[in-house]
Image (cartoon, rainbow, N blue to C red):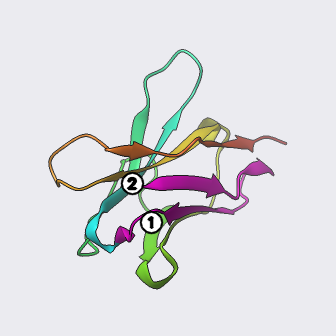
Amino acid sequence: QVQLVESGGGLVQPGGSLRLSCAASGSIISIYHMNWYRQTPGKQRELVADITSGGRTTYADSVKGRFTISRDNAKNTVYLQMNSLKPEDTAVYYCGARRLLFSDNDYWGQGTQVTVSS
């Protein structure tokens, strides 16, 4: 079992930055592929960024060049650095973990709200 707890969300002005953290417990995350999704009311959850156990990263086109996903296996934590934030980035952000590369997430965090507004 893996428990994931997100933190770092909040209210930020357009153009600002936030760093989200996802702290894992119950198992070491080095063997898991990790990702960040986001969801707005009435819409499906969408993949924002993914990082494999080997460190390979992928991003949604809408965040490329602005967001960076990283992992610190020693701290059992995954991060999402978000720069140049836009109002359309407003969403609840969820951290996820999976063992198999081409599968759905096995575990999810509870989510953290990010609001980009002036």
Label whose residue precedes the other's in the sequence (2 or 1): 2
Label disc, if present, on residue 69 of the rendered structure: 1
Residue occupying image coordinates x 31% and y 43%:
105
Q: Tell me if label 2 and label 1 are in contact, CB under 8 Å.
A: yes
Front-most of residues 48 and 1: 1
Residue 90: % across, % down: 65, 38
Which kind of residue does numbered mark 2 sit on?
Asn
How many discs appear? 2
Distance (Cα) linking label 2 and label 1: 8 Å
Q: Is residue 15 above or below residue 75?
A: above
* Magenta stretch in the rendered image: 1-29
Q: Is residue 20 left or right of residue 56?
A: right
> Relative to 29, is 52 on the left or the right?
left
Q: State the residue at coordinates (36%, 48%).
A: 61
Residue at the image position 18 percent from the left and 43 percent from the top: 103
The image's mark for residue 89 is none
